[in-house]
Structure formats: structure tokens, C-alpha cells
Image: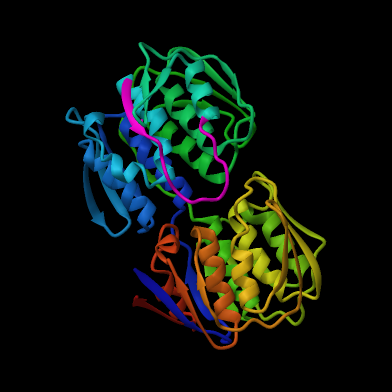
């Protein structure tokens, strides 16, 4: 086990580059199963969730070769066999749910262990199953496994009962090789969903409507290999922007699709953040005064993403007044509040979805624990602005989504070290 030791109170200064999107990479890696031809994927973040997805694909026979750091050549040829899957990794990784659509389209019969991942509330698989069953899949359970079988997949109009990013992505992959036309209504439109669609179209899929809530997919008989560069990670960009504002830093964040963060940027400005956009950059200047906003409410895209809910809460501890943090999507994402209170925050958990934070309050270094990926990044921000030394345990959670975060933060002035427990 490893931990971070952070000596806080130092403004961040300099330039930092955003890596590829975690949430775009995992479905795109899965989509490579839809062809026996070679695919080359660039701008892959070197994070544990992505590396585990690659391990799962290797375990079933996908050939992989790193051309250079972040650039991977993949070929899911004739030797791919879902029966050889490393189910232990699947059981610890929520993103493995994204294998359902591609495996069903390619093999028509397979089994998979229930995926694991962050404990951030109920994330039922029912919406996935209902959608895939509508295409013709038969799904049963057996000894802790989900068993999938389909003689053939036939397109139809499917209305998702809730906005689900991963269910939308699984449907896009499965429908690409189904017979006829599949129309997905109430489809998710997050940037990484659109990036998957662009990759599938490069492979020969016929997908229309990306970026709106009705997606039409004309099934084709065969997909071919393709080259693709993963989009920059908007969550990472937002995390670094909040860290810079919280520490009264002067930071240029490079490689940002700023239009994907329109509402996040406006909320940061409303709080008092001195933030500008220029080409593919976010320019953060020291902020004189932060003021509370009435509510930070997470929504589906283009709303404030749930993955930035916790970082916004740290910023609220430094803002004058009271802010309501409301995560409309998950009911288990507020455990980090107790860790912030250990550091001196004035925060109250109202119910599983809402917390009230009053500020400004000085934060002081403490021994704290990362409960999930985004909470971990949040506590790093809190420790960076806090007075004194903080120790953050369970940083494997942070490594799931941020590549070499301590090295990159060191480059912009953070006093952060990774040590063995």
C-alpha cells in the first residue's frame, strides 16, 4: 500500500498538460473487439483502470503492443476466446461492464462476472440488460456470473429508462453489428460517448445523432480496423483548475477541449475564480476573493459532472457564505465530507445526496483516507491548500484515474511525495 504525504499552503504555478480521457478510453478499447483487424489507439492515459482493461483484453487473446507511451496497437484476431477471461480483474473493475456490447456483437455467447469498482451508490445493471435484451439477447445468472446468448441481434427503437452513459455505449457497440436500424432514445451525450461514436464510425459503423439524445445506428455486416486519438480528459482539466483556484495559483492548463466544460467554467467564475479560456487552454490567475454560490448541482452533460462534485466542495470551504452541494446522480459520494471536517471544514451531510458547506474556513493537515477515485483527488486538493502536513491513504483509488498525479503536481510547485506504508 502507498500513500501521499503533502505539505500544503503553497500556490501552484506553471503549466500542466491534460492526459487522455479515462472514460473515453475504456469503451474504445472494448470496441476494438468488434473487428479482427488492427486498431491503433493514441493518447491513452497510463492509469490503473485502463491498464486493467487492457489486461482483461489480453487475457482473452487480444494482441497488444505499445508503439510508444500512450499509443497502443491492438488486434482481436481469431484466437480471441471470452472463456479465458480473467474474471478476478473483472470483479474489481466497474469499467468491465463496457465489454457487454462488444462481446455480444462479436461472439453471441459469453459469460462475465459482476463488475466491481468505486462504492459510490447504486449503479444497477438492469438498464444495460433491458436494452441488450431488446436487441435479442437472452441473459441469465449462474453461480455469480451473468450469461449472455443471442442467435442474432436485430435493431429496434429502444427507450432507455434513465440517462446511462455505459448503457448507451454498450448499445452503440452492439447495434453497430446488428441487423437493421437501432434508435436509442434518452441516450447519453457526454463527450466520451461522442468519442466512442467517432471511433466506431472510423471502423465503418453508421451512427448518426451523436451529441443529441436520439442516436440512430444502421447495422453493418463487418467493421474494420482504425486509428484514433482519445479526447483530453475534461474531469482532469476541471480537477486541476479547481486545485489552482483553491491554492491561489497561477496555472496554465494545456490540452483542454474547453467547450466541454462551459458550465463548469461559469460556476468557477461565479465562485470567484479568475479563469480564462484561450485556444485549448485554461488560464488560472490568483483569485482575490471566493464567494459561495447557492448550489452546485450535478447533472448529465452538459451539466456539472458528478465526477467534479467533490472538488467543488473543497472550493466551497474557501468561499464566503454557504453552498449546497447536491449530487443528483449518486447517493454514496459524500463520504469525503467527514475527511474535510477533520481538516477544519464546516460541512454537514444533509442526506445521501446533499451537503451544506460554510466558509471560508482554514484547513489543516491531517491523516485522511481516499474512499473512491474522485474523493481521493479532492483530498489531494484539500491537502495542497491546507496548512501543515497531510497523509492520504488508499491512493490506489487516485491512480485509477490520474496518471502520475504527484509528479505532474510537483512540476507546478506542489510538495507531494508518494511513499510506501
Q: Quadrant of residue 64?
A: top left
Q: Is residue 115 magenta?
A: yes
In the rendered structure, the answer to whether residue 32 lies left or right of residue 298 reads left
Query: Does residue 256 appear anywhere in the picture?
Result: no
User: Where 97 sits versus 269, above or below?
Assistant: above
Q: Is residue 289 magenta?
A: no
Residue 154 on image: x %, y %: 46, 12
Residue 416 on image: x %, y %: 44, 80
Q: Residue at x 47, y 53 (%)?
A: 21
In the rendered structure, the answer to whether residue 26 lies left or right of residue 80 reads right
Query: Does residue 332 appear anywhere in the picture?
Result: yes
Q: Residue at x 54, y 35 (%)?
A: 124
Residue 402 on image: x %, y %: 44, 62
Residue furthest to the front in view is 143
Viewport quadrant of the C terminus = bottom left
Residue furthest to the left in view is 79
User: Where 315 sits versus 296, above or below?
Assistant: below
Q: Magenta part of the protein: which range?
A: 109-125
In the rendered structure, the answer to whether residue 39 lies left or right of residue 202 reads left
- How many numbered dots are placed on residues in this image? 0
Q: Residue at x 24, y 34 (%)?
A: 76
Viewport quadrant of the N terminus = bottom left
Asked whether 318 or 224 is in front, the reply is: 318
Residue 405 on image: x %, y %: 43, 69
User: Where 302 sits versus 261, above or below?
Assistant: above
Main secondary structure found in the magenta portion: loop
Amino acid at each position: 500500500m502507498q500513500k501521499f504525504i503533502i505539505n500544503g499552503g503553497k500556490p501552484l504555478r506553471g503549466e500542466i498538460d491534460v492526459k487522455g480521457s479515462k472514460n473515453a478510453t475504456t469503451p474504445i478499447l472494448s470496441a476494438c473487439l468488434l473487428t479482427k483487424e488492427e486498431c491503433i489507439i493514441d493518447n491513452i492515459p497510463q492509469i490503473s483502470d485502463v491498464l486493467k482493461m487492457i489486461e482483461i483484453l489480453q487475457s482473452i487473446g487480444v494482441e497488444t503492443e505499445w508503439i510508444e507511451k500512450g499509443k497502443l496497437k491492438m488486434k482481436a484476431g481469431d484466437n480471441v476466446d471470452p472463456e479465458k477471461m480473467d474474471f478476478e480483474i473483472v470483479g474489481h473493475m466497474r469499467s468491465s461492464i463496457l465489454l457487454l456490447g462488444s462481446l455480444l456483437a462479436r461472439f453471441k455467447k459469453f459469460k462475465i462476472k459482476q463488475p466491481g469498482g468505486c462504492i459510490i451508490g447504486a449503479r444497477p445493471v438492469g438498464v444495460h440488460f433491458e436494452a441488450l435484451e431488446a436487441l435479442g439477447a437472452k441473459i441469465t445468472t449462474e453461480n455469480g456470473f451473468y450469461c449472455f446468448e443471442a442467435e442474432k441481434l436485430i435493431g429496434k427503437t429502444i427507450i432507455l429508462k434513465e440517462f446511462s452513459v455505459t448503457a448507451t455505449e454498450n448499445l452503440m457497440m452492439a447495434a453497430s453489428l446488428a441487423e437493421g436500424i437501432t434508435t436509442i432514445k434518452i441516450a447519453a451525450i457526454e463527450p466520451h460517448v461522442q468519442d466512442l461514436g467517432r471511433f466506431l464510425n472510423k471502423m465503418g459503423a453508421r451512427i448518426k445523432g451523436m451529441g443529441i439524445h436520439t442516436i440512430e445506428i444502421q447495422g453493418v455486416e463487418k467493421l474494420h480496423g482504425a486509428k484514433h486519438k482519445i479526447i483530453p480528459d475534461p474531469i482532469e482539466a476541471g480537477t486541476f483548475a479547481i486545485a489552482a483556484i483553491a491554492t491561489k495559483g497561477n496555472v496554465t492548463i494545456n490540452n483542454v477541449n474547453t467547450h466541454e466544460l462551459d458550465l463548469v467554467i461559469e460556476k468557477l467564475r461565479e465562485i470567484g475564480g479568475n479563469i480564462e479560456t484561450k485556444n485549448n487552454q485554461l488560464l488560472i490567475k490568483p483569485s482575490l476573493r471566493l464567494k459561495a454560490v447557492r448550489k452546485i448541482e450535478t447533472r448529465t452533460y452538459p451539466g456539472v459532472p458528478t465526477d467534479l462534485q467533490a472538488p467543488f466542495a473543497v472550493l466551497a470551504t474557501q468561499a464566503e457564505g454557504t453552498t449546497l452541494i447536491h449530487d443528483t446522480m449518486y447517493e454514496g459520494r459524500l463520504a469525503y465530507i467527514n475527511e474535510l471536517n477533520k481538516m477544519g471544514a464546516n460541512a454537514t451531510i444533509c442526506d445521501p445526496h446533499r451537503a451544506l458547506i460554510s466558509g471560508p474556513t482554514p484547513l489543516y493537515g491531517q491523516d485522511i483516507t481516499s474512499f473512491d477515485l474522485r474523493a481521493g483527488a479532492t483530498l489531494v486538493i484539500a491537502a495542497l491548500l491546507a496548512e501543515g502536513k497531510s497523509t492520504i491513504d488508499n491512493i490506489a483509488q487516485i491512480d485509477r484515474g490520474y496518471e502520475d498525479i504527484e509528479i505532474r503536481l510537483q512540476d507546478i510547485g506542489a510538495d507531494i511525495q508518494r511513499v510506501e506504508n
